[in-house]
Amino acid sequence: MPVNDDVFAALASPARREVLKLLLDGPMAVGDLAEHFAMRRPSLSEHLRVLREAGLVSERREGRHRLYSLDADPLREVSDWLTPYERFWRTKLASLRDLLDEEDL
């Protein structure tokens, strides 16, 4: 299954990657997330919108608060997409290691 381009666009921002990292520990309210950033609330809300539209977070209301949760399924798709490249580099690095080991002889 191809990775949605919106996921890559969402992951391009360091702030959005930090939001995902914070959500690893569980759902968080917008106010709690905002404490970790030196940006205004509307800017954080825009980052959350991009993450939500990419399917990386979900939002639910709990009383007056909006809680955001990580949805890691799109990240699994990214990981699956990257796997062949990881194998490629692992092979290249193993070849380099073998070459360097031969030079030490």
Image (cartoon, rainbow, N blue to C red):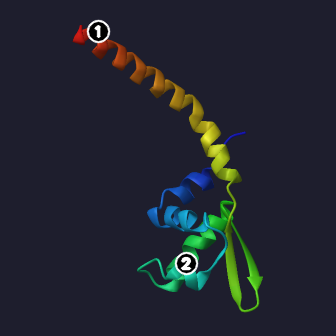
Instruction: Look at label 2 and name its amino acid.
Output: Leu
Instruction: Check the picture and name the quadrant holding the N terminus.
Output: top right
* Residue identifier under label 1: 102
Q: In which quadrant of the rendered view does residue 69 lie? A: bottom right
Residue at the (47%, 21%) spot, across then down: 91
Left or right, 102 with respect to 32, comes to left
**Labels 1 & 2 near each other (Cβ < 8 A):** no
Q: Is residue 49 visible?
A: yes
Can residue 3 be seen here? The reply is no
Q: CA distance from mark 1 to mark 2?
A: 52 Å
Foreground mark, 1 or 2, reads 1
Q: Nearer the viewer, residue 70 or 101?
A: 101
Where is residue 77? Give x, y as percent. 67, 44
Residue 67 position (above or below residue 82):
below
Tell me the quadrant of the picture where the C terminus can be found.
Answer: top left
Q: Residue at x 35, y 19 (%)?
A: 97
Q: Percent from the top left, x then y, of residue 42?
A: 53, 83
Label 2 sits on residue = 33
Dot 2 crowding, Cα within 10 Å, few <14, some 14–19, many 20+? some
SS state under label 1: helix
Picture quadrant of residue 62? bottom right
Taking the spot 40% from the left edge, 24% from the top edge, the residue there is: 93
Q: Position of residue 55 (x, y in %)?
A: 69, 60
The kind of residue tagged 1 is Glu
Q: Quick check: 19 above or below 41?
A: above
Task: Using the image, tell me which numbered label, if any, was put on residue 36.
Answer: none
